[in-house]
C-alpha cells in the first residue's frame, strides 16, 4: 500500500466525511492496540490513513489515549507524514472560536502519560530527540499552501500549550499559559508530537479554536461556545485537507 499521509482526527472529527473506506486495519503494537482500527481510504481519490484519536464513538479521554500505540501503528503501516487535527481553546486575541491555526511550537504541561519509546525497558532505544523545530517545516509549508489553495484563512501560527485534561483550565491557569507565551491550549498535542519525532514521522498540527480559553472573553459556558463553533471549524479543516491531499498528489 502506498499511503504516506495519515490524518489523526480529534474532537469533532471521529469520522472523516468524504473518506471512501478501502480497508480497516486492526493493529497490535508492543504498547497495545491503537485508539481504533486504522482506516485506509481515499480522499479526493488520494490514499490516506485515518485514525480517530479518541477512538470510535469518542470515548477515550486525552490523558488515557495510548499515544505510543497510535504512533507505532501508523509507523508500522509505513506512514511518513501525519497531520494531527486538534480542537483547542484560543488564548491569543487573533485566534477566535471557529478559526484555524498552524502551531509552530509547543509547551508540554502534561504529566503521567507514557510519553516516549525510550522508556528504559529491555531493548528500548535511548534517544534524545530534538524538538526544535517542534513541527515539521515542510509539512507546515504544504498546509499553508493548501490553505491558500482552498481559500481557508489561517488565523496565525503560534505556541500550543498542552494540558493534561480532561478538565478545562481555570482562568488563572489560562493567564499563566498566556504569560508563558501560549497562543492556544489543547489536551492532545503531547506526547503525540514527540513520539512522531522519535519514529521519524513528519508531523504537523492543524489547530481549530473551538472556544476562548477559560476566563478570557464572554464569561458564558465554554461548552456552549464549543457547540456553536466546532462544525464551522471542522468544515474548514476538511476543505483545507482536501486541498492538501490533492496538492500532495500533484507534487509526487
Ligand atoms: N482547553 C484545553 N483543551 C481544549 C480547550 C480548552 O479550552 N478547548 C478545546 N480543547
Image (cartoon, helix red, strand yellow):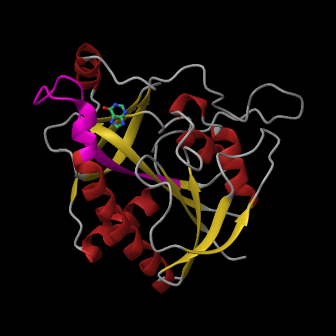
Tally the marks: 0
Q: Quick check: is 212 in the magenta stretch?
A: yes
Residue 40 position in % (x across, y down): 65, 69
Q: Is residue 45 magenta?
A: no
Quadrant containing the C terminus in the rendered view? bottom right
Res 194 quadrant in image = top right
Give the vertical position of 2 relative to 170 (above or below). Answer: below
Task: Give the quadrant of the N terminus.
Answer: bottom right
Magenta region, residue range: 203-227
Residue 151: quadrant of the picture: bottom left
Horizontal placement of 87 versus 149: left or right?
A: right
Left/right of residue 70 with respect to residue 188 in the rendered view:
right
Between residues 162 and 120, which one lies in front from this camera angle?
162
Residue drawn at (29%, 68%) of the image: 147
- Residue projecting furthest to the left: 218
Q: Nearer the viewer, residue 97 or 159?
A: 97
Residue 193 seen in this snapshot = yes
Q: Is residue 62 left or right of residue 129?
A: left
Q: Residue at point 53% right, 33% down?
A: 61
Location of residue 210 with respect to 49 vertically, above or below:
above
State the image coordinates of residue 12 (x, y, percent, origin top left). Answer: 40, 51
Q: Say which residue appears at 61% left-offset and 26% top-offset.
A: 113
Q: Position of residue 224 (x, y in %)?
A: 23, 37
Give the residue displayed 22% in from the left and 39% down from the top: 225
**Residue 75 spot, x, y in % from top left:** 70, 56
Residue lying at the far right of the rendered structure: 122
Task: Give the image quadrant in which the ligand numbered 1 is located.
Answer: top left
Q: Quarter of the image holding residue 13?
A: bottom left
User: Is residue 183 in view?
Assistant: no
Is 49 or 136 nearer to us in this picture? Answer: 49
Left or right of residue 84, residue 92 in this image: left
Amino acid at each position: 500500500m502506498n499511503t504516506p499521509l495519515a490524518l489523526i482526527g480529534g474532537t469533532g472529527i471521529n469520522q472523516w466525511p468524504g473518506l471512501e473506506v478501502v480497508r480497516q486495519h486492526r493493529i497490535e503494537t508492543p504498547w497495545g492496540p491503537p485508539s481504533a482500527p486504522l482506516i485506509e481510504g481515499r480522499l479526493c481519490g488520494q490514499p490516506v490513513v485515518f485514525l480517530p484519536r479518541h477512538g470510535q464513538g469518542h470515548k477515550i479521554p486525552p490523558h488515557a489515549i495510548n499515544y505510543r500505540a497510535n504512533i507505532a501503528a501508523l509507523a508500522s503501516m509505513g506512514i511518513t507524514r501525519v497531520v494531527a487535527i486538534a480542537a483547542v481553546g484560543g488564548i491569543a486575541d487573533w485566534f477566535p472560536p471557529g478559526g484555524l491555526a498552524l502551531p509552530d511550537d509547543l509547551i508540554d504541561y502534561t504529566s503521567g502519560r507514557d510519553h516516549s519509546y525510550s522508556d528504559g525497558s529491555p531493548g528500548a532505544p535511548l534517544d534524545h530527540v530534538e524538538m526544535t523545530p517542534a513541527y515539521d517545516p515542510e509539512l507546515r509549508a504544504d498546509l499553508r499552501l493548501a490553505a491558500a489553495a482552498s481559500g481557508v484563512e489561517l488565523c496565525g501560527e503560534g505556541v500550543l500549550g498542552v494540558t493534561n485534561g480532561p478538565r478545562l483550565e481555570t482562568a488563572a491557569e489560562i493567564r499563566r499559559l498566556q504569560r508563558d507565551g501560549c497562543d492556544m491550549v489543547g489536551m492532545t498535542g503531547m506526547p503525540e508530537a514527540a513520539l512522531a519525532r522519535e519514529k521519524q514521522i513528519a508531523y504537523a498540527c492543524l489547530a481549530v479554536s473551538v472556544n476562548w480559553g477559560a476566563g478570557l472573553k464572554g464569561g458564558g459556558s465554554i461548552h456552549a461556545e464549543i457547540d456553536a463553533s466546532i462544525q464551522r471549524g471542522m468544515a474548514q479543516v476538511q476543505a483545507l485537507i482536501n486541498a492538501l491531499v490533492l496538492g500532495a498528489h500533484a507534487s509526487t
